[in-house]
Image (cartoon, rainbow, N blue to C red):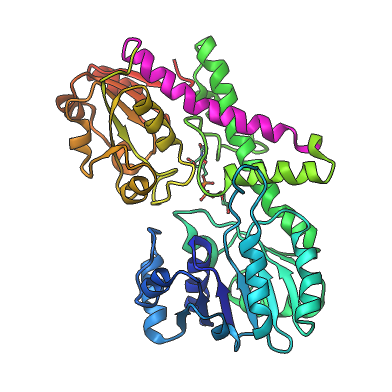
Amino acid sequence: MRISVVGCGYLGAVHASAMAHLGHEVIGIDVDERKIEALAAGRPPFFEPGLADILTSATSTGRLRFSTDIGDAAGAEVHFIAVGTPQMAGSDAADLRYVDAAVESLAPHLGEGALVVGKSTVPVGTAGRLAERLAEIAPHARLAWNPEFLREGFAVKDTIEPDRLVYGVADARAVHQLDDVYRAAIDAGTPRLVTDYATAELVKVAANAFLATKISFINAMAEIAEVTGADVTQLADALGHDVRIGRRFLNAGVGFGGGCLPKDIRAFSARAEELGRGEAVGFLREVDAINLRRRQRVVDLAVEALGGTAYRRRIAVLGVTFKPDSDDVRDSPALDVAVQLTGLGAEVVATDPQGIENARARHPQLEYVAATAEALRGADLVVLVTEWQEYRELDPVATGALVGRRVIIDGRNVLDPEAWRGAGWTYHGLGRP
Ligand code: UDX
């Protein structure tokens, strides 16, 4: 099948590569020349495990091409929209200008029977509006909404082997066209749900709202644990054995960040308010507030651990990305903590296996070092904020020999408190005694 993917960021670059890997003939389109050049040469413009392999093999066979010219999408039958929907400056709502521009610029190049498929996360109601617009400017084309549920770090696997497919459609032919695109997953038995536009749009935001709520729920329990001496990690284990609750996404710590959960719950609240149903999702404001309080808690704990002031104290911050196995620093709790500590006069030295370049572009005032040992050397306090495997495996004895003072805040509750205390450390977890 001939496919175009408009927008080659995290979502689009992975989607284009995965579709080509499945045997489709794919053209990826983006306005960013440097990004297109890198992708065409088989180089992912960001870190994502497994992407380089499928990108290189698909570009070398010619099944996957890239262009900055939207006119090159003309020969395709299915056109995916995978552009960003960032939080609008000065508001919680999603900025839809890139989605709108993609549809407008694609319209003159749509052939008879072409299907435009939205993948971007959008406020409910967007697809209906775009379908009306398409009927005006490209009446021979149709629209479908097919949300993406990929996780960074697992994006390739999540795209090739999704746990479900959701098609928001207004006509039966769109279902056949999407089935042809996802034939491999469908043959493998992937559940496929056919819905209207609004339901498909809502599945995505509801899923992210649920996940964010689950994390904030356990972080709220961590707040209670902190004043009662309970251990939130044991609490999560015990709760998780109830299959109705489940253990996943119950890890208390510095909270969620990234390019999706924070902006998606805010955009959902903003959209619900526009629809006159703000109270239905009023709890999402609380979910957001609990989440941001956890960042503040780590900063307060750091000051406390340093004896009341961070001024001129050397702090090693381990991790700058919002999660491990990614170089993404968007709304990263780790960077937020590092910036706040710097603001308190601390000498922060941050390190990360993949995220330093992106972090430096956003916060050039921070000091970054590539080697973990260098960040740790002479530190008065160590703050682990992103649970990269390398930090989980740190040896408390060897680490103790590098630092100035053996005090650590485990912002993700991934270290063994007994082992660290046994090696002479003062260990602070979040929601753990
Ligand atoms: C998320 C959704 O999982 C995905 O389905 C959607 O398509 C996009 O948004 P992603 O942003 O890649 O994916 O990251 P995810 O693994 O969901 O983690 C989000 C944040 O929550 C991270 O900062 C992570 O550290 C944090 N988190 C996750 C917790 O604090 N505790 C947990 O138990 C799980």
Q: Residue at x 18, y 21 (%)?
A: 404
Q: Nearer the viewer, residue 361 or 142?
A: 361
Q: Is residue 414 among what the camera can see? A: no
- Identify the image quadrant of residue 58: bottom left
Give residue 95's position: percent from left, percent from top.
64, 54
Which percent across, then down, holds residue 433? 44, 15
Q: Is residue 297 magenta?
A: yes
Residue in the foreground of this view, choosing between 21 and 136: 136
The quarter in which the N terminus is drawn is: bottom right
The chief SS type of the magenta part is helix
Instruction: Report the number of numbered marks.
Output: 0
Where is residue 81? Give x, y as percent.
62, 69
The residue under the point 59% across, 31% down is 216
Outermost residue on the front side: it is: 90
In the depicted structure, whether residue 257 falls above or below residue 172: above
Q: Is residue 420 left or right of residue 400?
A: right
Q: Quick check: 418 above or below 144?
A: above
Q: Nearer the viewer, residue 414 or 129?
A: 129
The residue positioned 31% from the left and 32% from the top of the image is 317
Q: Is residue 407 left or right of residue 223?
A: left
User: How far from the left and from the top, in percent, is residue 270?
Assistant: 72, 43
Image quadrant in which you'd find residue 427:
top left
Residue 206 shows in this picture: yes
Q: Which residues are magenta?
A: 280-308
- Residue at screen point 35% across, 70% down: 43
Inspect the magenta stretch and tell me whether residue 31 lies in it: no
Q: Looking at this rendering, what residue extends furthest in the left direction? A: 401
